[in-house]
Image: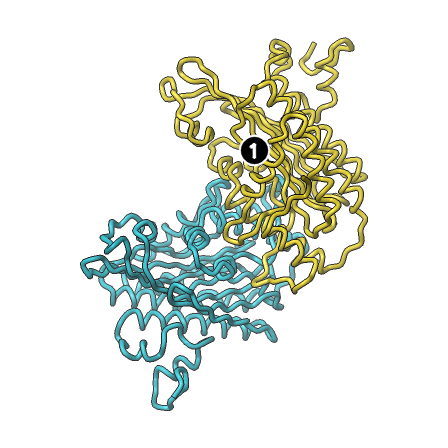
Chain colours: A cyan, B yellow
């Protein structure tokens, strides 16, 4: 039987049948190590991609994701799903990658945020996998949403394996809607609270700190959660935490799209959205670590990295919203982040 | 008499009356050192700004430059002129800055590209001045043009003064027009050739090397000239060279605007222009040294730095022009730069 063919008694085959494309790893490989976090994480990211793409497609009648399954010459590959210029979404990208190979000591140090890794002959075998997504809707009353969940393993010269998780999910509205902000954060908080009461407050703060456009003195959005280099309490605990977070993506965001995708809007509101899109581009190209690292990594798939950019953006010289306007209201939150749930 | 008032016998006053705004330095200061290159360069950059703004305004009937004269808290200031959303120009920015103060050793080293400067109590007095401009026209058959000419001085602990010039001028067409490319480069070559036969070939190559979007394997535009850290043969010679270059801006570019600003174009051609604008944003935010340095410098004027960004831009996932199209033709040149004049 060819890999990917479904066998009625085969749970893995059935699961894979619901993905946007067959897994990056061979099914035989996934079957050989069903309990390994690498296997479970690869299935989780594929599942997260399929659920979100399915939900988005349902909302944007007639629009279809284009699916590209790509191979990376140095090892592994990915599945990029993009829906562009639909009725509801300007650009929605959901990307999975599962890559492996050897890292140079320099790249490993950069990836592991300063860990001192002992390489064998200057090389460190690694595995990195994750799902990342940016959803840019057309209607300025529907917020942009971004998330990313990833798992990383490096093997040192003595066979010791280091691993960590990273990720997060954050919201970038054009206009502030407090109810939406509370719903989004509450859903993420519930996912976090299942695992530790410390996670949500800590990761909300990290999110506000990370998505900071230094030269503007503004955050990219109104918050969410963000974490990196997470390696305790245990791999099992953290996998379950990341699983809860990944499963919270659809319920945190899709209701906001449904609620607002038919809201009326003015050309002025569309213009303000375009200006905010410009700030999104500034953050992603100047500050985002993932984008920077991706662009500098030989052999990386540029189209998948830059699919986070909006379809359209605008830069106006010296644009300042008038006092007490809806535009000034959201700017105030971007300058002084708020706690949406306690 | 107040500074800036014209005295009929006063050559400096008359010159200043033609600028977009009074010089950044006090007239008394400029009068006190008429032969100093700092004075002559400040007048040259103001003159270049005024001539270009005047020429652009003549072409875009009814559009006016908004002029902001700003002060920098740490010393000096600038004059930013921006014309936005005109009939002919989407965004045209022409910025002059004349700043001074103390550099940290770190900043000085970065600015002086590795020169080892001896500071007094960790500080290095500096003067930096220049004119920089980006012109984004509406019509996709009119190319975008950028130029920048700057002069830099740093004083070491022993009173020794280091100085250098930098700058360049380059063209970014949406579609290739060979005649235009030749006219533009020939005009720059003539300016260079007045000073040294080596300048043009050397600086054309530096331009192709500098404006390289590494992750795309494409240049931002089709060329021009670029130079930095120029400090020989002599300050006088180099000032005259930079003066010739600055005076070449209007004759190299304005005829191309006149020629094409009423060319008919299709929505598809406009779309391709928007995609190329996206690449322009990628270069400026990710690679451009001036932009990066500006954004990281406390107290710099963000609006003046980012006025180089187009009013509108677009990013499409996996856009590839069809073979033998006009779009593929320009991409080919961006991937393999050409010599337009010998």
Quadrant assignment for the N terminus of chain A: bottom left
Q: Nearer the viewer, residue A202 or A48?
A: A48
Q: Position of residue B87 (x, y in %)?
A: 77, 45
Side of B338 where A48 appears, left or right: left
Side of A126 where A77 appears, left or right: right
Q: Nearer the viewer, residue B150 or A123?
A: A123
Q: Position of residue A54 (x, y in %)?
A: 50, 75
Q: Residue at x 34, y 84 (%)?
A: A11
Return the residue found at the far bottom.
A8
Q: Nearer the viewer, residue B270 or A169?
A: B270
Quarter-wise, where is residue B63 in the image?
A: top right
Q: Position of residue A96 (x, y in %)?
A: 43, 67
Mark 1 is surrounded, within 10 Å at the Cα level, by few (under 14), some (14 to 19) or many (20 or more) other residues, namely: some
Side of B154 where A313 appears, left or right: right
Q: Residue at x 61, y 20 (%)?
A: B237
Q: Is residue B255 visible?
A: yes
**Compared to A320, does B100 lie above or below?**
above
Q: Secondary structure at mark 1?
A: strand
Q: Nearer the viewer, residue A167 or A271?
A: A167
- What residue did someone put label 1 on? B227
Quadrant assignment for the C terminus of chain A: bottom left
Q: Position of residue B238 (x, y in %)?
A: 60, 23
Return the residue found at the far left.
A158
What is the chain letter for disc 1? B
């Amino acid at each position: 039987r060819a890999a990917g063919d479904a066998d009625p008694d085969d749970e893995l085959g059935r699961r894979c049948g619901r993905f946007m494309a067959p897994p990056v790893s061979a099914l035989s490989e996934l079957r050989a190590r069903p309990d390994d976090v690498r296997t479970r994480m690869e299935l989780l990211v594929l599942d997260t991609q399929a659920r979100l793409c399915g939900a988005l497609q349902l909302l944007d009648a007639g629009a279809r994701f284009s699916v590209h399954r790509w191979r990376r010459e140095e090892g592994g590959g990915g599945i990029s799903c993009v829906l562009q210029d639909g009725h509801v979404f300007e650009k929605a990208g959901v990307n999975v990658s599962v890559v492996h190979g050897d890292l140079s000591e320099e790249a490993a140090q950069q990836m592991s945020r300063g860990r001192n890794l002992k390489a064998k002959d200057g090389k460190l075998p690694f595995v990195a996998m994750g799902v990342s997504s940016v959803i840019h809707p057309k209607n300025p009353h529907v917020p942009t949403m971004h998330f990313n969940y990833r798992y990383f393993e490096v093997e040192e010269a003595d066979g010791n394996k280091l691993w960590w998780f990273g990720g997060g999910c954050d919201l970038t509205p054009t206009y502030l809607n407090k109810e939406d902000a509370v719903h989004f954060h509450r859903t993420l908080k519930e996912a976090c609270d299942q695992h530790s009461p410390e996670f949500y407050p800590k990761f909300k703060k990290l999110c506000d700190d990370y998505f900071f456009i230094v030269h503007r003195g503004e955050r990219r959005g109104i918050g969410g959660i963000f974490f990196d280099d997470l390696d305790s309490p245990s791999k099992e605990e953290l996998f379950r935490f990341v699983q809860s977070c990944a499963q919270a993506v659809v319920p945190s965001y899709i209701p906001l799209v449904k609620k607002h995708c038919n809201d009326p809007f003015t050309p002025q509101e569309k213009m303000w959205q375009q200006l905010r899109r410009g700030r999104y581009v500034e953050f992603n190209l100047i500050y985002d670590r993932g984008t920077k690292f991706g662009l500098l990594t030989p052999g990386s798939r540029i189209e998948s990295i830059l699919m986070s950019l909006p379809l359209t953006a605008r830069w106006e010289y010296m644009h300042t919203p008038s006092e007490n306007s809806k535009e000034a209201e959201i700017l105030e939150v971007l300058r002084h982040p708020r706690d949406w749930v306690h």
